[in-house]
Image: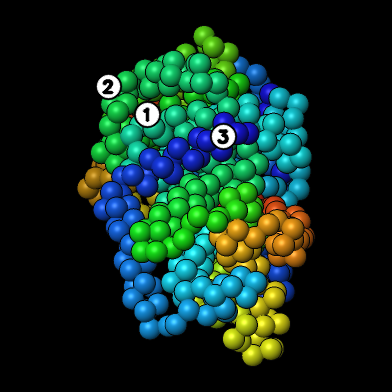
Amino acid sequence: MIEFRDVVKTFPERYGVINWLRRRGRMPRRRAIDDLSFTVERGELFGLLGANGSGKSTILRMLVGLISPDSGKIVLGGIDVVAEPVRARSRIGLSTGDERSFYHRLTARQNLELYAGMCGIPHAVRRSRIADAVRAVDLAEDLDRRFDSFSSGMRQRLAIARALLADPDVLLLDEPTRAVDPLHAEQLRATIVDLVRKHGKTVVVTTNLLEEAWNLCDRIAVLRAGHAIAVGRGEELRERAAGRRHYAIAVDRIDDGLLARLRAVEGITAIDFTGEPGAGRLRVALDPRVRSLNELLAAMSANGVVVTEIGPQPISAADLFENLTSGTADAG
Amino acid sequence: MLDKLRTLFVRDVRISLTYRYSFVLSWIAIPISVVSLWFVSKLVPPSPHFGVNGMEATYFEFAVVNVAFLTLQTAALQSFDNSLRDAQMFGTLESLLATPNREELIVLGSALWALTLAVIQVCWYLAIGALFGLHLGHVNVAALLLFALFAILATAPIGILSASFVMAFKQGAPTSFFINGAATLVGGVLFPVAVLPHWLQVVSWWFPIAHALGGVRGAMHGASLAELAPDAGWLAGATLVLFPIALLALRSATRRARFDGTLGQY
């Protein structure tokens, strides 16, 4: 349904007419999207996960033709997005989540009427489309309120309603639950899943919330500096990202010399000590591809340490996110 | 396409009506302007320079028509880049350009209300002027409408070029400001072009507003389309040459903004 093939995007490092004239139109550019390739299947809920500035929003904007790539191919439902942007846009609903993208002095209904008109929705069905869209995001009661009286979360939900208006094949949702309260965030996620499972929509969601990506998306592309460092199902990526296993180990004695010797053991990627000098507790990160837990214990024993207690430590969401987005995890 | 233009028009009417005080004040300003010209005209004796084909006319008849129709030029020059700049500043431009429409439709459609408002304000000007002695009995309505349309069409490309500049560089081009200012000097708005030195009359010939006002004043005095053909021809030619250039510039500027990723920036 969607294909990004070897897409590169650079942006000028400086803007403005004076800079442009001074450099005769040739401004130095920085690379924002770096040789990016991925595909999204029809009816798939696809996540773009990455830290701020990793290129998630740029990808959505390129898909809708607001930003054109330097090179590479972007195809949506067989349509070349760069060559036929208007045709491509007729199949896309975009929710940027930018509060400024609405007219603050108009009501929610007037805003949606405008966008319905601009999407070419016939008058006969415009009213019912608007009603359906706001019902999906629980804003039916607020339709005749002015936009500037909406909270951030309501504005976010209205942006999603706007994306739904034209009943597009593809929905692009830029951080759809940002600023939304937990209850409505959960409702929104359920709505998004329904759109995919019941209505066969193809949805691309950007997020920097790891759990949201895991729980919501069929597949996820993990982005770092505009490059997809991993693409796969949530569970696969979790396995890969976990990479290093973490253990809490209570030991009978410990000293700086012993810590230094353990740090030198191949396969131990990090070791922290907590507690009093002498007996204490170690937090050990182990790369299971290099050394098993048995080998770790043997290494400790060989260094004269008696283990009194040992247990696995679950990797935190923050560690997983760091592992993934810093490139510690394997590319897939 | 017409429905989409109507949609943009309705949006701008609705927004305009939310600013009630400035909307009302803009209508009150017109009678004040007309009355001011009426008092000034008491100081200036009637002259053939103010009329058409050597017919004597008052300064009031001359100036009130010119100032009224200058509104059309101002709207045509400023409404395209103003509406685009507003959309950039308020953040609505990206969301509009994400709809399945060409950028030309959005930029042109966003100026429709301002242009329509200008036409209505011209009528208001003339109606108030009539209360103070502006004679409307001989008006060639068809010619007047034609020249009103030309006043917009021949000037709009300069406004669209300015909008292209806004699209590419996020700031208005000085062209609109310059042309609007220069028009009051060489466009024959406050005094006839005939009183200018010869070289300024040559400069004046290059300004669309000079031809538009010449045609409008002729139509007000009942001149036929055949009599006004030279001005109409000039304006038609300017429209045909400038409009495609302006639309190409707009498309090129939008392409550049898409490439630089600056469509949503201001």
Viewer-side label of 1, 2: 1
Q: Spot the residue most to the left.
A: A276
* Residue at image mark 2: A141
Are the residues at dot 1 and dot 2 in contact (C-beta closer than 8 Å)?
Answer: no
On the image, the x and y values in percent for residue A132 come to 42, 16
At label 2, the amino acid type is Glu
Q: Quadrant of residue B89?
A: bottom left
* Pointers 1 and 2 within a single chain: yes
Q: Name the subunit of mark 1.
A: A
- A207 to A30, vertically: above or below: above
Are the residues at dot 1 and dot 3 in contact (C-beta closer than 8 Å)?
Answer: no
Q: Residues within 10 Å of mark 1 (few under 14, many from 20)?
A: many
Viewer-side label of 1, 3: 3
Q: How much space separates mark 1 and mark 2, taking CA atoms?
A: 11 Å
* Residue at image mark 3: B4
Q: Secondary structure at mark 1?
A: helix
* Residue at image mark 1: A109
